[in-house]
Amino acid sequence: MISLRKQLIFLAILLGGMSAMVNAQEKLSGLHYNPLLRSNAGSSNPQQKSGTTALTLPFFEDFSVNTLTPNASKWQNQDVFVNKDFPFNPTNTGAATFDVLDETGQVYSTASSVPFIADYLTSHRIRLDSLFGTDERELTPADSLYLSFWYQPQGRGDKPETNDSLVLQFGYLTGNLVFESMDSIIVPADQYLFDQGIDQIDAGDTIFSPEGCEPGLFIISNRIYTWGDDITVPCDSIFVPEMRWQNVWSAAGTSLEEFRQQFGSDFNQVIIPLLNENYFSPGFQFRFFNYGSIATTGLEAAGNVDQWNVDFIYLNNNRSLGDTTYNKIGFSGRAPSFLKRYESMPYRQYRSAPTNAIRPEIHVNITNLSDDTKNTRYRYTVEQQNGDQYFEWDGGNCNLNPFSTNGFQTCETGCGAKHSCPPVASLFALDFEQDTASFLIRHYISDSSVANILVDSLVYRQGFYNYFAYDDGTPEAGYSLEPTGAYLAMQFNMATIDTLYSIQIMFNRTTDENVDKYFDLIVWDDNNGIPGNIIYKKKRQKPHYEETRYAFTTYELDEPLIINGNFYVGMMRESVVLSIGFDRVNDAKDYLFYNIDGSWVNSSIDGSLMMRAVTGTAKTIGLPNEMTVANAIRIYPNPAKDQLNFEQASSDFDPSLIQIFDYTGRKIVETTFVNRIDISTIQTGLYIVVVQSERNTKQTSKLLITR
């Protein structure tokens, strides 16, 4: 159910498409499982509705609530993946993605290279026999019932093959009963042995069901039964009302690019009348399902493929074929990051050059699904979590034309730009006492023509932690590089001198994950915008596959590296192909490089490799673990060059001893407390300064020495 490809795709990605071959080294493949669904399997849907009470008109679903699986109060099965990542330019936020993964996030056991039925999305029963409410009466075909929906092949995933398809069926109860299964009971073997005067029942013997069960039922024993054993035998046939399904619409697999050329848009709306009198009953249902197919060999084997996105499903009476607009305005897709280059970056690095880190403007997609021009108002707010900062941008009012004729709100007019391309109105707070910070950004769009002013909202959490990340944390594909011995590198930039402690990588599970795989973890310096000299290498590392949701594996450096400016983290794989998570929402291909023949080349694939650089403070190794204090002694400058000053900031702390340790725990300096010490003979690097008091309490601080 969620994610991407079967044929390791030699790529040429056009605006979000994954298609044919363009480069023999870089490859994208489908994910072999969806950890979001896998970790969600077995948990209760917060929208679960007890019982199976039939629904009434109108029926509407836009998948805007990100529950991972469908709302159980409307849908019978949980196969499809409800998400905001795979739809490309949806009509609103969220869609249901059909693929070849089941509700537990794993490829269907029935999957094959021959098209097979994969995901179902089946409604609960809908009362189409009558209208309810203020106009209670019988429903007939004359009441003009139509079902409409939007759909899209591929999205940010894999294009369905021509023989794959998306199907819609209508279903109704025939009034007949059909056999569904056989109910069984457990009978003590002692009962048979005693009645027949024997000591055992042999394999191959016939065992009839006891009195009280349906006559004539029996099983052929497949084992020996003796005294004390239990035997499961059939007892009653279970019959259920017969449901007859009829195909009413289908679409053959195609790429998003071909689809766009055919329909002139990223999503196409379908509207279908309900004309068969059999549908007008208490037991009407409809369902979507997809045919998918997978490759059976190579890295692409058993990868997730053949995505379809379905959205905005609406069933009601008094409609027509021309009823394809809706009195709804809202946002489409995810809320954007305010950062220019990264999805997340260390707070220290942001503080050193905040104006360079922030975008001048952001872009949000706003839709008007009605057939009238709406006068809308847009604003966003930024609120610091556990802090004091709060600011708001008010974009004022602007006319929003219908999506059916004009698409999303344009940035080409003054007021349109204030809504769809608003400026970042303020820098985030610069709190020099904190190592991390988090800001909640809320976007609001409202319609001045309705009484309920607030119409839609988007929320984004802008985090500043201890790592650089281009990705949003969710992979839509797996990235691999060939041939053996190829180098892969991601560029990051330290705006101010800092330390690199570790590298985080999200590896995708594969069918051959138990095979020994090794790679060298490498850090390079910069050579005019491409990787230069190797400054760190950790040989023969193994990928780890975490069970938690899209978890990264952390590879710690043996010793922290002091870095300023551009640097590169990456790997060289030894033999077996490795698949790394690839985010197709954020495009960072300008910062991804590979080298197969001695020359570094920029990636040609839109997206972000899920590899992160961790900076800042790490755990200190080899230091004593006595009681510690903070901010009792001011130590400056930091970074330092030749002299280090100590200034007492608290009368409660009586300093007696100064110690300096390197990051292996080796003691470099020990002296009685003085206000200044000479460090000119200590090599550049990262150190730990410990100031001890007469009462054996200690203040521990990080020190960076540079020259």
Image (cartoon, rainbow, N blue to C red):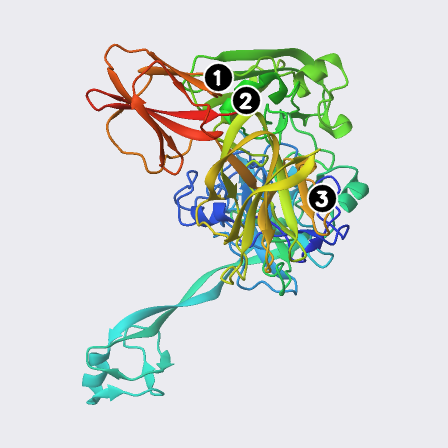
Q: Which mark, by number, is residue 350?
A: 2
In which quadrant of the rendered image does the C terminus lie? top right
Q: Is residue 205 left or right of residue 80?
A: left
Pick whichever of labels 3 and 1 is earlier in the sequence.
1
Residue type for callout 3: Trp
Q: Name the residue under label 1.
A: 383
Q: Which mark, by number, is residue 600?
A: 3
Q: Nearer the viewer, mark 3 or mark 1?
A: 3
- Residue at left offset 30%, top offset 88%: 202
87 or 636, which is in the foreground?
636
Q: Is residue 546 left or right of residue 324?
A: left
Q: Is residue 125 left or right of residue 670?
A: right
Q: Which of marks 2 and 1 is in front?
A: 2
Report the residue that reaches farthest toward the bottom.
Answer: 198
Residue 477 visible from this viewpoint: yes
Marks 3 and 1, how far apart at CA: 42 Å
